[in-house]
Image (spheres, grey):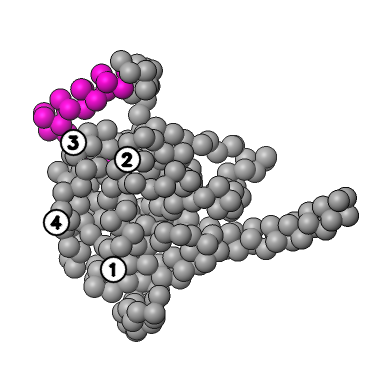
Amino acid sequence: MTHTRTKSVVLLNGEPIEVLWGASKAAKDWRVTSMDRIEAARSITELLKLDHPPVGIMFASERPDGVEALADAAPSACAMWRVGEKRLFYADAEAHFGCAVGALTMGFELPADVQSRLGDTADLMRTSGYVAPEELEKLPTVDRPKSGIVYGPLSSFTEEPDLILMWLLPRQAMMFNEATDSVSWTLPGGSLLGRPACSALPVALNTSRAAVSMGCIGMRTFTEIPDAYLLAVLPGEKAAPFSEALAAKTEANRTMQSWYEESKRALT
């Protein structure tokens, strides 16, 4: 199949940015971005009224050409989500070893010293009553080959990311769940995840379903995200249908809100 690709310049948040039209999954020029991702980021941000830009995540077999490697040390994988709000970068396995639990959840092979720290952390989690002993062996992990992870604003991705991360307030999470059918009474119900927050990534990736997490104390510490926010994770291939469903659910909620307000006035 032949894909015709053209480049042009558009404005994103008032800044000129070179974009790639008609890009296929095989596109490798990371110096430009895809109009599909720009439109998805814009649509999701506007409809949900996000305070923070959606972040793309892609598990990569090597550092893509045109993507800089993370230069500064990061204390955890979740800390990289915040850096990814601002710029595109690649972090290899070693860059994730600051938090042994996060490195395990991301599915990286752990060297002996990191395994030792993981054991110490697990012991503390059990003895402090943070987790039950049988929970740790059930921890979901990313199960695919990779040398590292590409993080960055969704609008910066040339290729389709594996996952899209968002910080949501409760009302935004309500709309997210409605647009992903996580609250449909005719479908298997979604679950509100918790510790560790990074487990939401393999859950969404392995099930191809959206996930919402209340976070964990590690995430709150490393990311410094305010307590009001929840973490939402969307499979990358769901971006377009999610945007369409979100637009429809936004209009439906406007209709229902008008009706509820009218009913409230009539009864007060």
- Label 4–label 2 contact, CB within 8 A: no
Task: Estimate the spatial distance between the alpha carbons at disc 2 and disc 1, rounded to whole Å.
Answer: 37 Å
- Label 3–label 2 contact, CB within 8 A: no
The reply to whether the magenta stretch includes residue 124 is yes
Which SS class for mark 2?
Answer: helix
| Pointer 2 or 1: first along the chain | 1
| Pointer 3 or 4: first along the chain | 4
Which SS class for mark 1?
Answer: loop
Asked if residue 181 is positioned above or below residue 45 in the image, the reply reads: above
Residue 109's disc is 3
Task: Estimate the spatial distance between the alpha carbons at disc 4 and disc 2, rounded to whole Å.
Answer: 21 Å
Camera-near label (4 vs 1) is 4
Camera-near label (2 vs 1) is 2
| Pointer 4 or 1: first along the chain | 1
Task: Estimate the spatial distance between the alpha carbons at disc 3 and disc 4, rounded to whole Å.
Answer: 21 Å
| Pointer 3 or 2: first along the chain | 3
What are the residue bounds of the magenta stretch? Answer: 106-126
Q: Is disc 1 surrounded by few (<14), some (14 to 19) or many (20+) residues within 10 Å?
A: some
Residue 221's disc is 2
Q: Is disc 4 surrounded by few (<14), some (14 to 19) or many (20+) residues within 10 Å?
A: few
Q: Amino acid at mark 2?
A: Thr
Q: Amino acid at mark 4?
A: Ala
Say which residue appears at 70% left-offset and 61% top-offset: 254
Residue 27's disc is 1
Relative image position of residue 123 (x, y in whole percent): 25, 19
| Pointer 4 or 2: first along the chain | 4
Task: Estimate the spatial distance between the alpha carbons at disc 1 and disc 3, rounded to whole Å.
Answer: 28 Å
Relative image position of residue 124 (x, y in whole percent): 27, 20
